[in-house]
Image: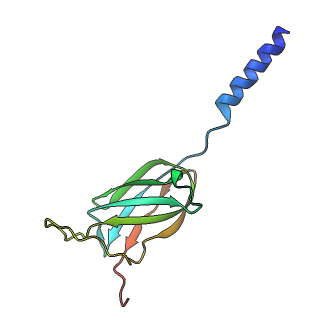
Amino acid sequence: MATGCLIGLLLIAALSLGGCREPTAAVKGKVTFDGRPLNNGAIQFLPTDGNYRRAASVAVVDGRYDIPVLVPGEKVVSVQGVKNESNGPEPQPLPENLEGNRATVVLRPGRNTFDITLETARGR
């Protein structure tokens, strides 16, 4: 009887240690705006399934970002920030209709690199 209880406890311990963790991803990259690194902004990775508890966001500083842990999967990438030349007391936000913004990407488990090139929409 004691052997059966011991085996049961070992099985419960093995299951609790082994299999419930979800895989994670990390993503880093560069963000450029009209050919220059974006000085100041934020980047969001929003799940396409609408489960925003699995979203991640981080600051973009000197054209770089790094998110060490997030849930892998399909994401919409959105960048907000201020124009590089906005040094005054009222910085100008990035235009809404930037080409390259709101792209859909697939983040795989492990390390990912995703560079974003934002361009002012011409002729719109």
Q: Residue furthest top?
A: 2
Residue 2 sits in quarter: top right
Q: What kind of colouring is applied to the model shown?
A: rainbow
Q: Residue at x 83, y 15 (%)?
A: 4
Q: Quadrant of the C terminus?
A: bottom left
Q: Residue at x 35, y 59 (%)?
A: 42
| Location of residue 123 with respect to 111 vertically, above or below | below
Badge count = 0
Q: Quadrant of the N terminus?
A: top right
How far from the left and from the top, in percent, is residue 56?
A: 46, 53
Residue 36 sits in quarter: bottom left
Q: Residue at x 77, y 14 (%)?
A: 6
Q: Residue at x 19, y 71 (%)?
A: 85
Q: Nearer the viewer, residue 23 or 47?
A: 47
How far from the left and from the top, in percent, is residue 65?
A: 37, 56
Q: Residue furthest right?
A: 1
How far from the left and from the top, in percent, is residue 72?
A: 56, 53
